[in-house]
């Protein structure tokens, strides 16, 4: 590292989006400390910041590195950062409606969300395991706080505590794994890691395998893949709904980005070892997620199990170990972000202080009083099931193509069978909305934010289902810069 | 062909349904009128196909080719040949009748009903026109959404159960087919083009695997025994329009799938699986007919008769000779018309009595003479009386079945006898016997209802006396298909040696 000229130590442009967000976060901390702030200042500033960060993301050149080669700005990170920033933007849009409904008036809300996203962006860009850990912790600590924000709500307390304990465990796993890997190879740089493993002929070394396994387990926790999914339903249920929406998408995408980069860049020659491990995680996730979701009566718990199942699908692309597989996963995560946030936007739209809109029962006869909300929910449910012409189908099709091209016919069969099972509980919601007698319910008016978030997600789910080429090409190209 | 006729046929109802969404909910008359207008225009749009279809070639016509998803080499390919053309026409025709028959039967969520019906129509036409496997799959699955809603929202008392059962059965089958499609995709060097796929040869073990993967999707849709159990529920619980679409078009797609995909793409496997398929068809024929005899619900009886009739269709297809296949295709159209007409009739009488129990009826012939006359004709067509279209189809199939496996024709013929038994017995119990006094004030068919029945009756007689109107569309394409399946010599022998009593 001594040869690096001082200017290169810290070049600003590759991390410009992160810097903008950090500045904004600090500014919001300042604003929040004033007693009387107009209601819409914080969300508008956050949304604006997310948009600026998105713009900066596309003005920096690819391949630039920063912070002593610990962070890289490439097509791959740009794709995942886009998912996280879109998730931030949509969450901010739906947050105001939710905060009004449950009277959650914490100034920290938006700062924490911004810092969480900065953490994710660092994770996504990190090509060094130490930097990766820094990003991971920044994200995790912010999200723990977000989950427990409603501190008088026992469910939120339980969720925050559970999430914190489990998250601490997984960080511990990651550090153990990191220690073993560093001890054997003497480096934390991903690109050097691959060379050292080849040079020292470590690919059959049990200690290195243990290290790799621990890292994989840590991120299996973070993406909520079975058998490390136990925290998910409780945390999703207890967290404020807007935070659940955010959690179901952004941390998951960031963790998948890490998983893909670490495994494909750091341990490519050990694919024979981590491939089957991830295959087990994937099959278990699809099985547990889709089967247990059938028994849920709370829609947030149901979507939690559904998110476990979707983590299973997304793992398929990574375990294929091919560029095609990874871009299939990227494509799927973007699509999943849109449909999941869309579904949560509807839940937020229906939410009230007494917890309405959280029980599946509350959706009975929704089509009678709120036909538009029901129609959109129907669209998201069919997309989550993977029925064409919605985006969910195209996402799954790409994953199936990738996994079968890598020769895993049985995994593909498993994936389609479990997604047939998933149809049952997604359809149950449709049944409730359209085929049950309505209880008298108020006709709700869409708030501006929720309407805007729904426009984005509906447009995405419909457009990516009918003309997926643009994003497919984008995800493919992102791989070239990898 | 520069004019994208098939795209227009597919997307006109979709755009129409979007227009329908804009009509205010408070104006039901306008909604119904617009829906009828859209379906009528769609029917008129099929006119160029009637007039411009070239019956002398097996090549695809009205072809459209565009790149769609270049990364996967997925194309937007549309085209029709002698096998698919009739179904496109039938889909357009049946939808008009469905709109008409729902005129007063559907009272709640009116707008959504017609939107779902039109979306369904667009997807159905798409299924028959698609020449790319992904495009086909897209339409094939997209159809599930409106059909699920049609059954589940506007259906009978047990509608939710029936809708979910229908959806899950079809979905599982389709997803297995999807895996099969992808296996084929990689085996063929990454193409989804159906015509290219059908021009290659694949190892026999792969063909057998694919045959059963496709079977999972198509057999559920037909439905063949033993995966038929969703059909009685779906048919019975669906609203009249839903039953008519199900019987008329949807279940034809399974048989069409065998014709378009299994047979030309997997010819060796198809030949090897000929006997199992014939046996399954025969079980369907006889079992379906016997179950009909014990039904107490009119709609359920007709539903089970569909199982039996579709057994005839698959028997004809897998007899794999000219008479069998042509009879099978013709019988698909016939069954769509006849069973569609029976469901329409039952829907009309249900609207008046709100009961489907056979035992509740009796003596309708003296109360509703016009209706009884029409229903008698439909019953006779279902039984296969000479002069009606049912006779032509069944006769060709029996002939083809005899040519392929003589014992098959013996069993199938017993299905014809059972068919006459249950249909005539049904007619007797509903229209003759003691008059149920509760119904003595029922009104006979009104003008709108007669307008629905007349074209059906005319079609039945027209096809019955002049089957060549339809058969002439398919001769060349069927010959070409059989050449592909049986190899050159066998097909030629089939054509020259086989006697076609209805001319060629």
Image: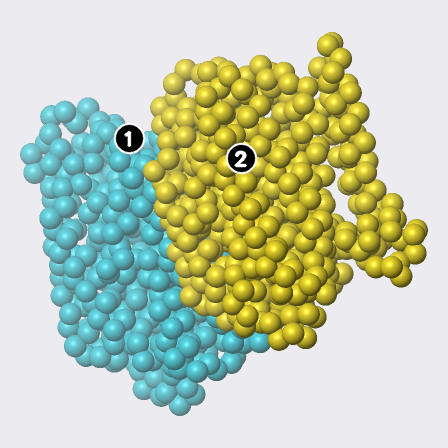
Chain colours: A yellow, B cyan
Residue B260: x and y in percent read 44, 68
Q: Which structural element holds mark 2? A: helix
Protein chain holding label 2: A
Question: What residue sits right under mark 1 in the picture?
Answer: B351
Mark 2 or 1: in front is 2
- Are the residues under marks 2 and 1 on the same chain? no
* Left or right of residue A284: residue B405: left
Q: Residue at x 71, y 49 (%)?
A: A131
**Residue A49: horizontal and vertical position, in percent?**
78, 32
The one nearer the camera, B80 or A408, is A408
Q: Indicate whether A58 appears above or below B403.
A: above
Q: Is residue B129 left or right of residue A451?
A: left
Percent position (x, y) of residue A175?
Answer: 59, 50
The residue at the far top in this view is A36
In the displayed orientation, state which residue is furthest to the front. A183
Q: Few, some or many C-alpha atoms within 10 Å of disc 1 (few <14, some 14-19, many ≥20)?
A: some
Q: Residues within 10 Å of mark 2 (few under 14, many from 20)?
A: many
Residue name at image x 25 percent, y 73 percent = B276
| Residues tagged 2 and 1 counted as in contact (Cβ below 8 A) | no
Please identify the quadrant where the C terminus of chain B is shown.
bottom left
Q: Which residue is mark 2?
A: A164
Label 1: chain letter: B
| Image coords of residue B411 (percent x, y) | 15, 70
Residue situated furthest bottom in the rendering: B489
Describe residue B418's horizontal placement relative to residue A45 as left or right. Answer: left
Left/right placement of residue B435 relative to residue B187 reads: left
């Amino acid at each position: 590292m001594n040869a690096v000229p001082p200017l290169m130590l810290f070049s600003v442009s590759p991390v410009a989006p992160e810097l903008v967000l950090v500045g904004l976060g600090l500014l919001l901390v300042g604003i929040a400390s004033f007693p009387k702030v107009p209601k819409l200042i914080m969300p508008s500033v956050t949304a604006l910041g997310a948009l600026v960060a998105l713009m900066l993301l596309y003005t920096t050149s690819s391949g630039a590195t920063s912070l002593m080669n610990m962070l890289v700005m490439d097509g791959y990170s740009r794709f995942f950062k886009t998912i996280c920033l879109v998730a931030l933007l949509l969450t901010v849009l739906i947050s105001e409606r939710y905060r009004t409904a449950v009277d959650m008036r914490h100034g920290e809300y938006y700062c924490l969300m911004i810092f969480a996203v900065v953490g994710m962006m660092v994770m996504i860009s990190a090509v060094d395991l130490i930097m990766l850990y820094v990003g991971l912790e920044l994200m995790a600590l912010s999200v723990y706080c977000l989950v427990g924000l409603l501190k008088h709500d026992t469910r939120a307390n339980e969720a925050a505590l559970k999430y914190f304990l489990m998250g601490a465990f997984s960080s511990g796993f990651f550090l153990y794994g990191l220690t073993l890997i560093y001890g054997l190879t003497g480096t934390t740089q991903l690109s050097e890691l691959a060379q050292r493993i080849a040079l020292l002929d470590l690919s059959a070394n049990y200690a290195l395998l243990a290290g790799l396994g621990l890292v994989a387990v840590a991120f299996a926790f973070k993406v909520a893949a079975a058998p490390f999914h136990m925290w998910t339903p409780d945390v999703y249920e207890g967290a404020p709904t807007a935070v659940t929406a955010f959690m179901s998408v952004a941390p998951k995408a960031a963790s998948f980005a890490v998983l893909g980069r670490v495994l494909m860049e750091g341990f490519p020659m050990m694919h024979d070892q981590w491939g089957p491990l991830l295959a087990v995680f994937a099959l278990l996730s699809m099985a547990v997620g889709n089967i247990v979701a059938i028994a849920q009566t709370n829609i947030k718990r149901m979507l939690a199990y559904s998110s476990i199942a979707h983590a299973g699908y997304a793992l398929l692309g990574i375990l294929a170990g091919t560029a095609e597989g990874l871009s299939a996963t990227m494509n799927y995560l973007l699509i999943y972000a849109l449909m999941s946030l869309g579904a949560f936007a509807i839940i937020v739209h229906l939410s009230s202080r007494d917890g309405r809109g959280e029980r599946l029962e509350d959706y009975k006869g929704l089509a009678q009083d709120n036909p538009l909300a029901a129609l959109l929910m129907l669209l998201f449910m069919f997309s989550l099931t993977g029925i064409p012409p919605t985006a969910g189908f195209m996402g799954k099709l790409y994953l199936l193509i990738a996994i079968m091209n890598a020769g895993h016919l049985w995994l593909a069969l498993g994936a389609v069978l479990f997604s047939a099972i998933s149809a049952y509980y997604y359809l149950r919601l449709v049944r409730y909305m359209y085929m049950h007698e309505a209880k008298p319910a108020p006709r709700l008016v869409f708030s501006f934010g929720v309407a805007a978030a729904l426009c984005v997600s509906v447009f995405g789910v419909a457009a990516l289902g009918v003309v997926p080429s643009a994003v497919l090409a984008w995800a493919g190209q992102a791989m070239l810069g990898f | 062909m520069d004019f994208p006729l098939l795209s227009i046929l597919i997307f006109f109802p979709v755009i129409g349904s979007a227009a329908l969404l804009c009509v205010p909910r408070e104006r039901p008359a306008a909604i119904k009128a617009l829906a009828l207008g859209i379906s009528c225009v769609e029917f008129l749009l099929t006119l160029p196909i009637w007039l411009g279809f070239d019956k002398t070639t097996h090549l695809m016509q009205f072809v459209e080719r565009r790149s769609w998803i270049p990364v996967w080499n997925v194309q937007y390919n549309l085209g029709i040949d002698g096998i698919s053309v009739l179904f496109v026409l039938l889909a357009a025709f049946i939808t008009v009748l469905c709109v008409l028959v729902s005129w007063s039967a559907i009272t709640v969520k009116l707008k959504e009903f017609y939107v779902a019906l039109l979306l369904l129509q667009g997807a159905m036409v798409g299924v028959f026109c698609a020449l790319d496997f992904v495009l086909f799959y897209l339409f094939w699955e997209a159809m599930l959404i409106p059909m699920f809603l049609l059954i589940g929202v506007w259906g009978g008392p047990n509608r939710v159960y029936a809708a979910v059962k229908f959806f899950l059965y079809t979905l599982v089958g389709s997803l297995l087919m999807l895996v099969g499609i992808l296996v084929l995709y990689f085996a063929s060097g990454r193409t989804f083009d159906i015509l290219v796929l059908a021009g290659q040869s694949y190892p026999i073990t792969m063909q057998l695997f694919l045959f059963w993967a496709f079977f999972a999707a198509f057999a559920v849709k037909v439905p063949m025994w033993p995966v038929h159990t969703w059909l009685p529920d779906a048919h019975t619980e669906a609203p009249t329009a839903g039953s008519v679409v199900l019987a008329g078009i949807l279940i034809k797609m399974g048989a069409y799938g065998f014709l378009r995909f299994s047979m030309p793409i997997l010819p060796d496997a198809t030949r090897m699986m000929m006997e199992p398929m014939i046996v399954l068809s025969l079980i369907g024929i006889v079992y379906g007919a016997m179950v009909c005899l014990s039904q107490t619900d009119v709609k359920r009886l007709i539903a089970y008769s569909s199982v039996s009739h579709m057994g005839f269709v698959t028997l004809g297809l897998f007899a794999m000779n000219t008479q069998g296949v042509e009879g099978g295709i013709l019988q698909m159209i016939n069954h769509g018309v006849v069973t569609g007409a029976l469901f329409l009739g039952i829907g009309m009488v249900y609207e008046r009595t709100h009961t489907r129990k056979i035992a509740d009826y009796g003596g309708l012939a003296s109360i509703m003479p016009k209706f009884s006359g029409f229903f008698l004709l439909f019953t006779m067509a279902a039984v296969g009386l000479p002069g009606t279209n049912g006779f032509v189809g069944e006769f060709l199939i029996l002939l083809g079945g005899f040519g392929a496996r003589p014992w098959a024709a013996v069993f199938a013929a017993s299905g014809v006898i059972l068919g006459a038994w249950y249909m005539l017995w049904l007619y007797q119990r509903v229209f003759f016997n003691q008059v149920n006094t509760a119904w003595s004030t029922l009104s006979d068919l009104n003008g709108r209802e007669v307008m629905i029945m007349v074209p059906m009756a005319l079609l039945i007689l027209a096809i019955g006396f002049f089957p060549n109107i339809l058969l002439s569309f398919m001769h060349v394409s069927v010959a070409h298909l059989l050449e592909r399946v049986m190899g050159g010599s066998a097909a030629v022998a089939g054509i020259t040696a086989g006697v076609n009593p209805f001319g060629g």
